[in-house]
Image: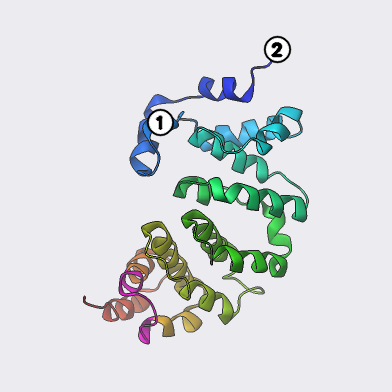
């Protein structure tokens, strides 16, 4: 007889990884981390996705452990229908309580209908929940900065996010650093015209300068745009 989900996850625990993860996630207490590595989570999700237990697990929110949330996200990635996937994501997002879970799951079926997804992203960016906002920003960063879906509206959506929470501001800065890589000409006015919060402005420049995809001359120019407090 196969062990249940809650019996099996502890069997995959790696104590050193558990403590490593805890250091990266100050919003999650150590006793809520089992210590299962993401590749193992995704393999297990593939194994159980079609099972009745997995379906029950997806409806049993909130989960007690960080790793259970990661498994939830990995299961959502395997949903093959847009409507089912978006409904499941919306049900899950209010229960996401850390940046790692937020950033790790991305049901690729959602990418097949970018205009429909953008309506949901716009709503997520207005949420009062930190990681719902961050999830919208992460999806913009990965899925909307390349042709043919990119438009100046994408930059405006990210710039309009006004949240003081660190994990949101870092996501905005990350977005603009990647936008500089992929859409330099369209993005640069947000820095030259100082349209961004000072911290986000400087952090976006820092992250862009760290990128190997930014040329030396671009990096030199970005350094000249750093703002003082």
Q: Is residue 66 above or below residue 142?
A: above
Alpha-carbon span between mark 2 and mark 1: 28 Å
Q: On the image, which quarter does residue 193 sit in?
A: bottom left
Q: Is residue 162 above or below residue 5?
A: below
- Which numbered circle lies on residue 215? none
Q: Is residue 180 left or right of residue 87?
A: left
Secondary element under disc 1, as helix, strand or loop, is helix
- Does residue 25 show up magenta in the picture? no
Query: Which residue is disc 1 drawn over?
Result: 18
Quadrant in which the C terminus is drawn: bottom left
Closest to the observer: 169 or 215?
A: 169
Please state the extent of the stretch shown in magenta in the rendering.
Answer: 191-202
Q: Position of residue 170 (x, y in %)?
A: 39, 61
Q: Is residue 133 above or below residue 15?
A: below
Q: Position of residue 138 (x, y in %)?
A: 52, 60
The residue furthest front is: 128
Mark 2: few/some/many CA within 10 Å (<14, 14-19, 20+)? few
Secondary element under disc 2, as helix, strand or loop, is loop
Quadrant in which the N terminus is drawn: top right
- Which numbered circle lies on residue 1? 2
Q: Residue at x 48, y 83 (%)?
A: 185
The residue furthest left is: 229
Q: Position of residue 192 (x, y in %)?
A: 36, 85
Of labels 2 and 1, earlier in sequence is: 2
- Does residue 197 show up magenta in the picture? yes
Closest to the observer: 212 or 159?
A: 159
């Amino acid at each position: 007889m196969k062990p249940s989900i809650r019996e099996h996850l502890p069997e995959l625990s790696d104590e050193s990884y558990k403590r490593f993860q805890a250091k990266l996630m100050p919003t999650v207490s150590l006793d809520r981390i089992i210590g299962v590595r993401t590749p193992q989570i995704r393999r297990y999700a593939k194994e159980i996705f079609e099972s009745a237990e997995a379906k029950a697990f997806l409806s049993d929110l909130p989960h007690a452990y960080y790793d259970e949330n990661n498994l939830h996200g990995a299961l959502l990635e395997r949903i093959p229908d847009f409507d089912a996937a978006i409904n499941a994501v919306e049900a899950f997002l209010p229960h996401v309580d850390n940046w790692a879970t937020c950033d790790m799951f991305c049901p690729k079926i959602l990418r097949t209908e970018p205009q429909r997804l953008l309506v949901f992203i716009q709503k997520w960016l207005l949420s009062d929940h930190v990681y719902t906002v961050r999830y919208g920003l992460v999806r913009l960063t990965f899925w909307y900065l390349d042709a043919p879906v990119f438009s100046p509206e994408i930059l405006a959506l990210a710039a309009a996010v006004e949240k003081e929470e660190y994990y949101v501001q870092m996501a905005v800065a990350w977005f603009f650093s990647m936008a500089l890589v992929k859409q330099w000409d369209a993005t640069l006015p947000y820095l030259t015209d100082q349209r961004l919060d000072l911290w986000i402005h400087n952090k976006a420049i820092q992250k862009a300068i760290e990128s190997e995809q930014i040329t030396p001359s671009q990096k030199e120019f970005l350094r000249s745009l750093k703002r003082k407090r």
